[in-house]
Image (cartoon, rainbow, N blue to C red):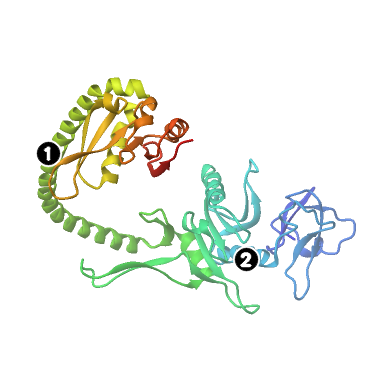
């Protein structure tokens, strides 16, 4: 059901207005045989209806499934009327179910300014809507120079990002609709930096809120986190004053922080110098091991991670030797002895030649960078071996005892 209908000669009819918005009386459309009225949304035939308990409106002869006006809930129907009546009581011209010239929007209630131009849409939004949809529909109104206030009865995610009010449905017929969320004041007393300050949402009759919005006594405030609500200029001024005081206090704190920053910057420069030195050492190490990388196929790009994993697993200092012909041209790894002597002892060999595995000492760990290397060693082993797989790509470490195939 809807409040509006279209007549071929009279034009648009609004059941919420005494003269139907076209200079006709309700008796001209109610129970008049042969009168043809159409739905402004879907074009289907509609009839006028009213009773002692039902507000006058138009209903479809056959309810279409895809017509929004035909399928409105009673709550949506009543909230639209309440918004229109509130705007009219505040002294504004308000019409129900008004579509834009491009028909890319249809306002539940459109409020017109003194020059007869669409000024603000009041939308009774009771059905679900995403945040993106709310913003898109708000932008559509804005492109036509129309402001909008969305009115819901439940907490919705979109209400924090578009101008909105959340209202409570009256518990009894005749009770007033009440705003529960969307209007806020700034509480800060006394107005000193030590006093706590916060925005507090307030309740009021819906009629008062609509009047304040239309008269400009409240306007949309956007918080730093993007949340919006309606508030008065005075409260915004207080919030701005608080922000200035905080900025001054922050300036004092920044001066002290600047001194600490300079000291930290000096430490960072020193760290950068150490990092450059480490990079030079790494470059020299990669150059020294170029032949080893070429023979084994080990990717030099992963060498730093591989070396770090070896140090982490050893749990103590590690030094790298040269590729050793006595150990299948594998790269020797020395670790500091755990007996406190401070000596470095041979602890492992990286990627030795597979032909050397036949006489490999069982105690000496073979270090490889991948499961592929492990598989090749398992296929060639002729004596028990200790293999550590340190994969620098996925940063995984596993120790695998290998027995002859």
Question: Residue 351's quadrant in the figure?
Answer: top left
Q: Residue 37's x, y, as percent?
A: 81, 53
Image-based side of 258 in relation to 119, left or right: left
Residue drawn 39% across the image and 27% down it: 354
The residue tagged 1 is: 270
Residue that sits furthest to the right in the current view: 34
Closest to the observer, 78 or 340:
340
Question: Is residue 195 positioned above or below 326 on the image?
Answer: below
Total marks in image: 2
Residue drawn 11% across the image and 51% down it: 255
Q: Residue 98's x, y, as percent?
A: 65, 51
Image-based side of 255 in relation to 137, left or right: left
Q: For the N terminus, which image quadrant?
A: bottom right
Question: Is residue 311 positioned above or below 163 on the image?
Answer: above
Q: Residues within 10 Å of mark 2 (few under 14, many from 20)?
A: many
Sequence-earlier tag: 1 or 2: 2
**Spatial separation of the CA atoms under disc 1 and disc 2:** 68 Å
Residue drawn 86% across the image and 56% down it: 35
Residue 282's tag is none
Q: Residue 27's x, y, as percent?
A: 80, 65
Assign a secondary structure to mark 2. helix
Image-based side of 18 in relation to 351, left or right: right
Q: Residues within 10 Å of mark 1 (few under 14, many from 20)?
A: few
Question: Residue 15's quadrant in the figure?
Answer: bottom right
Question: Is residue 116 positioned above or below 1 on the image?
Answer: above
Closest to the observer, 226 or 244:
226
The residue tagged 2 is: 79
| Mark 1 or 2: the one toward you | 1
């Amino acid at each position: 059901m809807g409040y509006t209908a279209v007549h071929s000669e009279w034009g648009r009819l609004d059941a919420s207005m005494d003269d139907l918005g076209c200079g006709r009386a309700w008796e001209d459309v109610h129970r008049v045989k042969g009168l043809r009225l159409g739905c402004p949304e879907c074009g289907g035939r509609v009839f006028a209806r009213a009773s002692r308990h039902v507000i006058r409106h138009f209903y479809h002869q056959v309810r279409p499934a895809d017509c929004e006006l035909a399928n409105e809930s009673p709550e949506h129907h009543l909230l639209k009327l309440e918004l229109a009546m509130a705007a009219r009581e505040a002294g504004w011209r308000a019409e129900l179910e008004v579509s834009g010239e491009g028909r890319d929007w249809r306002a539940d209630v459109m409020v017109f300014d003194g020059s007869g131009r669409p000024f603000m849409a009041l939308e009774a939004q009771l059905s679900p809507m995403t945040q993106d949809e709310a913003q898109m529909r708000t932008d559509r109104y804005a492109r036509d120079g129309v402001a909008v206030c969305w009115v819901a009865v439940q907490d919705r995610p979109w209400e924090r990002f578009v101008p909105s009010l959340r209202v409570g449905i009256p518990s009894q017929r005749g009770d007033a609709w009440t705003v529960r969320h969307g209007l806020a004041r700034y509480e800060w007393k006394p107005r000193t930096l030590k006093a706590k300050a916060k925005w507090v949402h307030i309740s009021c009759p819906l009629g008062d809120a609509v009047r304040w919005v239309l008269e400009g006594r409240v306007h949309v405030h956007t918080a730093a986190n993007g949340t919006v609500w309606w508030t008065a200029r005075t409260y915004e001024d207080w919030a701005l004053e608080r922000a200035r005081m905080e900025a001054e206090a922050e300036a004092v704190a920044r001066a002290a922080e600047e001194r600490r920053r300079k000291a930290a910057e000096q430490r960072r420069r020193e760290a950068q110098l150490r990092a450059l030195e480490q990079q030079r050492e790494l470059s020299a190490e990669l150059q020294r091991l170029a032949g080893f990388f070429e023979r084994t196929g080990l990717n030099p790009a992963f060498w730093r991670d591989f070396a770090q994993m070896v140090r982490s697993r050893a749990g103590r200092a590690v030094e790298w030797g040269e590729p050793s012909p006595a150990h299948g041209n594998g790269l020797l790894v020395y670790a500091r002895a755990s007996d406190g002597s401070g000596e470095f002892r041979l602890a492992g060999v990286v990627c030795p030649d597979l032909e050397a595995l036949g006489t490999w000492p069982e105690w000496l760990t073979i270090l490889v960078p991948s499961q592929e290397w492990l598989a090749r060693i398992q296929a060639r082993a002729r004596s028990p071996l200790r293999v550590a797989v340190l994969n620098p790509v996925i940063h995984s470490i596993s120790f695998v005892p290998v027995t002859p195939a």
